[in-house]
Image: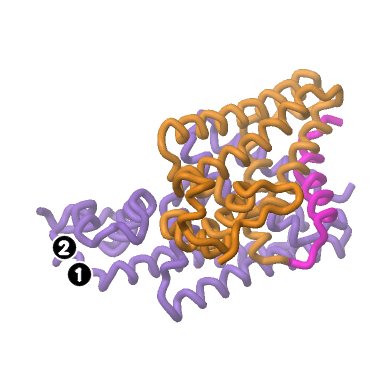
Chain colours: A purple, B orange
Amino acid sequence: MAKIKPGKNTSKKEVIIKSASVLFRTRGFSAATMRELAEAVGVEAPSLYNHIGSKSEILQAICFKVANAFNDQLAAIETQQVNTISKLEHIIRFHIQMMMNYYDEVFVANHDWKHLEEPYLSNFLMQRRNYEKRLVAIMEEGIRKKECKNLNPFVVVLTMLSAVRGLEFWQRHKKNISVKVLEDDMVNQLLKGITAK
Amino acid sequence: MAKIKPGKNTSKKEVIIKSASVLFRTRGFSAATMRELAEAVGVEAPSLYNHIGSKSEILQAICFKVANAFNDQLAAIETQQVNTISKLEHIIRFHIQMMMNYYDEVFVANHDWKHLEEPYLSNFLMQRRNYEKRLVAIMEEGIRKKECKNLNPFVVVLTMLSAVRGLEFWQRHKKNISVKVLEDDMVNQLLKGITAK
């Protein structure tokens, strides 16, 4: 079999992570084997180990790649000098784009994080709780500034996160709806109801 | 061990189904054994088989009990002489109440339906697709009657269903928020954005 062929802008490790995301999503992390991964990448198993130590290490790479993407984006949004509804709109659109463009990675991070080993498991869960808290803080600020209705901030954040996470089912359906309509209509539905007049 | 003790208004089979829902949710359907179920019900395994044939049969009972509850409620709502937004509000509130009052059963139906055997698997999936289509039809009627904004009906339905399904995470968190606030705020957030002015 051939060597791992990285693309123009991707490292060999990134090629492995991408293939592993597809494999873990379709086969399940527990069932997937390093041999299957080698086949998917198109190399012999030993050559995989030149780039990555174990299945566990790949799962860590996937979960923290996804977590970092969300954290970095949120950090950028938090410092924007715009009103709360615009911030929430950016967040929703970013979640939808991640679901569309990095579906396999996001799916694995959403479902298989429970197979992370310590200390990665605790770290990942702490990051998720923090992410949720930062969203709640944005909503609380919006209520304080009277940019948002006085709804329970936790309920609002849960509803938003659940709605975007539900795009998993959407991916399975592959309905013929453009990402633009999806983004615009979800933003409309999720934000108009919480915007103060 | 004792005999299966039904409550005033519950049959022995219902007692078994309730215990099985808790067991399947916490242990996972595949891992759970009839012996564990017998222990949970508080009887010897052989006496379980007087009431129910197999683990598979119990899963069918749980999944179709949940499906029937949603179908019956939707059928009642479809015939109501109220506007579309009221219909959707009833549907959202019913989903939230089911999540709160029959959490174990709904969780098992949402996650373990894939372990159903044929012809039950196909039947269950057909019922789910139908349920979704009937919700889309309600939204389409609302757009036609100009009671709803002209949003993509499938996106609206997916957002609603995903948001209520996300209450799974809520159940795990057990935040100190009343069901009334939860219902009212979710209805507010999910419906104000789709209501035509």
Q: Secondary structure at mark 2?
A: helix
What secondary structure prevails in the magenta region? helix
The magenta span reads B175-197
Image spot of residue A77 (x, y percent) = 65, 62
Q: Residue at x 58, y 27 (%)?
A: B130
Pointer 2 and pointer 1: residues touching (CB < 8 Å)?
yes
Q: Residue at x 39, y 52 (%)?
A: A25
Residue under numbered circle 1: A49
- Chain hosting mark 2: A
Work out whether residue B21 or residue A81 is closer to the camera in this orientation and state it: B21
Image spot of residue A146 (x, y percent) = 88, 58
Q: Residue at x 20, y 65 (%)?
A: A48
Q: Secondary structure at mark 1?
A: loop
Residue A61 vs residue A183: left or right?
left
Residue under numbered circle 2: A45
What is the spatial separation of the Cα atoms under label 2 and label 1, in whole angstroms? 7 Å
Image spot of residue A40 (x, y percent) = 23, 51
Instruction: Give above or below for B84 relative to B1.
Output: above
Image spot of residue A47 (x, y percent) = 15, 65
Q: Amino acid at mark 2?
A: Ala
Q: How many marks?
A: 2
Q: Amino acid at mark 1?
A: Tyr
- Chain hosting mark 1: A
